[in-house]
């Protein structure tokens, strides 16, 4: 057994896990810096959220739930109703220019809202489950098509259809606001969870790696102390690499969510169009 190589490995594990614990402290400082706000900043933030909620309540014509799942289901239902209303207006006046395009877009949006609602019905109430249903729900293309149709046939479209198009666009924009807001909540939860788990796992990993390193330095004249070294080495190595594995898993999840939700309306990215 090459003890010198093992010394390097365990020394690296100890140093690396101490670094991860330092990362935990930095993450907690980042969270605290976002949470420590003045009363004026807190009031502005709360008022903005309340205003957004009132806009959704005005569209849905009822009080929205405080849970993300219920809130989003109500918003999706309101969007579907507006899309169906637009389709009805377009089909009732078959001779008007642009009616077929609007009816087709309304049907496409209605089907998309049905798919999201089905996913939400099958989801749990956690923020991540709600966010997963919104990862690819950037409606920049749909909004752009509606705006182009409205501009092209502006003089031919009746006032109710003009208003209906604006309502649909407003609902789609509100869904994107909800997606970005839930993403911010999800990131805060993930960072807090990561910092807590790294502390729980990192400190024992350092202790086990240090204890294993001390056992390896015992003289060969004490066989009782190193009798189980063949079992101790793989176990201690697995525990030593566990904090790094946890960190990588969290980074992979958050990076994936960020990549799929990077663009906000009125823009989109190729990743969100796949």
Image (spheres, rainbow, N blue to C red):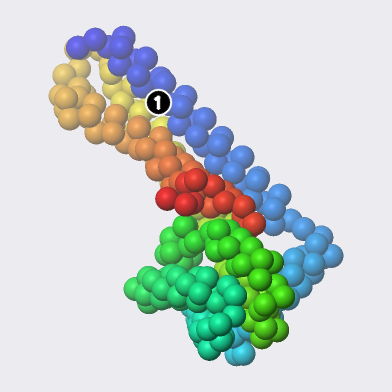
In the rendered image, residue 170, in percent from the top left (x then y), is placed at: 65, 72
Q: Position of residue 251 (x, y in %)?
A: 46, 42
Percent x, y for residue 69? 48, 74
Q: Residues within 10 Å of mark 1 (few under 14, many from 20)?
A: many
SS for tag 1? helix
At 24% from the left and 10% from the top, the residue drawn is 2
Image quadrant where residue 163 sits: bottom right
Image: 256 above or below 183: above
**Quadrant of the frame with the N terminus:** top left
Residue in the image at 62% along x and 52% along y: 267
Q: Would residue 185 be seen by someone viewing this image from the given angle?
A: no
Image coordinates for residue 107, horizontal then vertical, percent? 45, 75
Say which of 166 and 158 sits in front. Answer: 158
The reply, left or right, for residue 52 in relation to residue 70 is right
Q: Residue furthest front?
A: 95
Say which residue appears at 54% left-offset and 74% top-offset: 102
Whether residue 5 can be seen here: yes
Residue furthest to the right = 40
Q: Nearer the viewer, residue 178 or 216?
A: 178
Taking the spot 75% from the left edge, 66% from the top edge, the residue there is 45
Taking depth in this image into account, of 273 and 221 the one nearest to the observer is 273
Nearest the eye: 187 or 142: 142
Query: Which residue is denoted by mark 1 in the rendering?
Result: 13
Q: Is residue 203 left or right of residue 38?
A: left
Look at the picture and state if 219 lies above or below 156: above
In-image side of 202 versus 231 (left or right): right
């Amino acid at each position: 057994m090459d003890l010198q190589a093992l010394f390097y490995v365990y020394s690296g594990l100890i140093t690396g896990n101490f670094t991860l614990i330092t990362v935990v402290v930095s993450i907690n400082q980042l969270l605290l810096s976002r949470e420590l706000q003045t009363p004026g900043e807190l009031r502005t933030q709360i008022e903005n959220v309340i205003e957004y909620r009132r806009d959704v309540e005005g569209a849905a014509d009822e009080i929205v739930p405080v849970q993300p799942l219920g809130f989003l289901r109500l918003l999706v239902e309101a969007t579907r109703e507006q899309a169906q209303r637009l389709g009805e207006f377009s089909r009732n006046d078959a001779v008007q220019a642009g009616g077929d395009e609007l009816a087709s877009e309304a049907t496409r949006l209605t089907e998309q809202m049905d798919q999201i609602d089905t996913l939400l019905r099958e989801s749990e109430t956690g923020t991540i489950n709600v966010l997963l249903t919104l990862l690819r729900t950037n409606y920049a293309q749909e909004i752009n098509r509606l705006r182009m149709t409205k501009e092209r046939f502006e003089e031919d479209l009746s006032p109710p259809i003009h208003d209906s198009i604006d309502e649909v666009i407003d609902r789609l924009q509100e869904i994107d606001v909800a997606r970005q807001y839930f993403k911010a909540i999800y990131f805060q939860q993930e960072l807090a969870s990561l910092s807590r788990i790294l502390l729980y796992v990192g400190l024992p990993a350092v202790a086990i790696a240090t204890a294993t390193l001390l056992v390896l330095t015992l003289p060969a004249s004490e066989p009782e102390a190193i009798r189980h070294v063949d079992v101790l080495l793989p176990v201690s190595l697995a525990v030593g690499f566990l904090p790094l594995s946890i960190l990588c898993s969290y980074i992979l999840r958050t990076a994936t969510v960020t990549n799929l939700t990077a663009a906000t309306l009125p823009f989109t990215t190729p990743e969100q169009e796949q």
